[in-house]
Amino acid sequence: MTAHAALDLRDLGLDRGGHILVLRALRELGPGRPLAVTGGHPDLGLQLSVMAREGGHSVTENTGTSPGERKTFTVVAGPALDARARGAARAGSAVHSRDHRGVSDRADERWGVAARGAMVEAGAPRWDFSLDRAEVVWTDDAKKLYAQAAAAQWDPETAIPWDAPITHPPAVEEAVVQVMTYLVENENAALLVPARFLGRIHPHYREVVQLMAIQIADEARHVEVFTRRALLRSSEMALSTAGGQRSLQTLFEETDFVLATMLLSVLGEGSFVDLLRFLHEHGPDEVTRTIADLTARDESRHVAAGMAHVRWAIEQQPQDRGRIRSAIEQRHQALQHTSGLNAEVYDALVLLAAGSFEPEDIARGFDAVQALQRRMLEGRTRRLARLGFSESEAESLAGLHTRNFM
Ligand SMILES: [Fe+2]
Ligand SMILES: [Fe+2]
């Protein structure tokens, strides 16, 4: 036999890390090539034979080669040193390119929660992620939108001037509490709808999962700040109506990812941005105005994410446009016998824009809320048109959106 590679473990046993050195030397040599392992650990022979049995290697004791207590063994690596030879396979590619070719069209159930690009050992369990196709969940914009969201996170404790003076009359404060009560229930729905989908999306599409997770964190913050603003001077929240909740329940019950994204983010959150900008302009105190400004910025990102998702889905499956049309019509039918926006919220918005109970001011406030509703309608029409709906269809579908705004 020719001189072969040698490893001296000294007194180190395989029970204290010696296996790392043996495996490293075997990998360097490759399968089939002998390695002489010398050491003084009393159980070395037993330990090497256990390791050889588990790893498919062979081991023999050399006689009369070492002085004293030290012994030498010849270890030859079996063919399964490499993970690939043990049946492991790559979970797709680790990086994604601009045109999604780096992510797989379909994520394998055996990849499970493994990092994208990891070697997944044979025998790993199968995971049931029902949203496992790129054509449904992917968007090239997810990575960029996630990065923007991560950079734009704000701390409610420090970003909002909670101690700013509140000098308006109690009736105006009551209007603020009513609007905040309404906002919280909408935010609860906006948090729960994506949260229900999140656990169904295959983590192979990690940028999408990250984007949705940070969006959910945004909504958690919105729930907090609207609640805190409501209770800043009041000890109680105001009214939640049956019609408002029914509208939100239809979002909650939508089980199709593309349709839920369309209804919630493109149409609902789109209109919500207009509402928050209205509150930024007409809020009677700095706390309300600051909250409205910060949440509107977050919501604009949610709308951008929704648009990116739906645009992508329609590009992959143009028939989705027809499904979207039906979903908007069906939701309209389901809600047509409900009152939509609660009258208390409407009147509260009028009062906030009026700033007083003078009839002229109330008239101005009323006009401002009417203008808000027109802006919401125009915004929905514009977004539908950008998704490829004809001008007249965009207009009629935008008009079918819930009177509850979301
Ligand atoms: Fe929100
Ligand atoms: Fe949102």
Image (cartoon, helix red, strand yellow):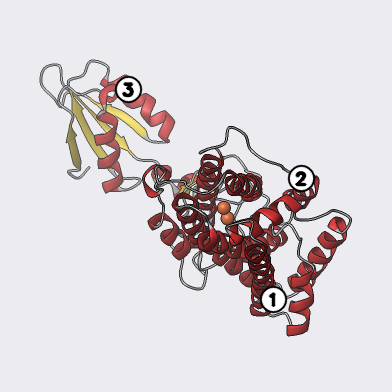
Mark 1, ligand 2, within 8 Å: the answer is no
- Asked if labels 3 and 2 touch by Cβ distance under 8 angstroms, the answer is no
Check the image and name the residue furthest to the left: 67
The correct choice, above or below, for 129 with respect to 351 in the image is above
Q: Position of residue 203 (x, y in %)?
A: 54, 50
Q: Is residue 3 left or right of residue 404?
A: left
Q: Residue at x 44, y 65 (%)?
A: 144
Q: In this image, 67 relative to 315: left or right?
A: left
Task: Give the alpha-carbon distance from disc 2 to disc 3, as whole Å.
Answer: 72 Å
Of 168 and 259, the residue lying toward us: 168
Mark 2 or mark 3, earlier in chain: 3
**Mark in the foreground, 2 or 1:** 2
Distance, label 1 to label 3, CA atoms, is 73 Å
- Residue position marked by numbered label 2 in the rendering: 241
- Which mark, residue 47? 3
- Tell me the SS state at disc 1: helix
Local packing at callout 3 (Cα closer than 10 Å; few below 14, some 14-19, many 20+) is some
| Structural distance between the alpha carbons of marks 2 and 1 | 27 Å
Which numbered mark, 2 or 3, is in the foreground of this view? Answer: 2
The kind of residue tagged 2 is Thr
Which residue type carries mark 3?
Gln
Q: Nearer the viewer, residue 213 or 318?
A: 213
Question: Which residue was labeled with disc 1?
Answer: 381
Look at label 1 and name its amino acid: Thr
Dividing the image into four quarters, tell me where ligand 2 lies: bottom right
Which residue is farthest bottom?
Answer: 391
Say which quarter of the image contains residue 406: bottom right
Q: Mark 3 falls on what kind of element?
A: helix
Looking at the image, is mark 1 or mark 3 earlier in the sequence? Answer: 3
Instruction: Give the percent coordinates (x, y) of residue 399.
Output: 77, 71
**Where residue 350 sits in the image (x, y, percent)?**
66, 59
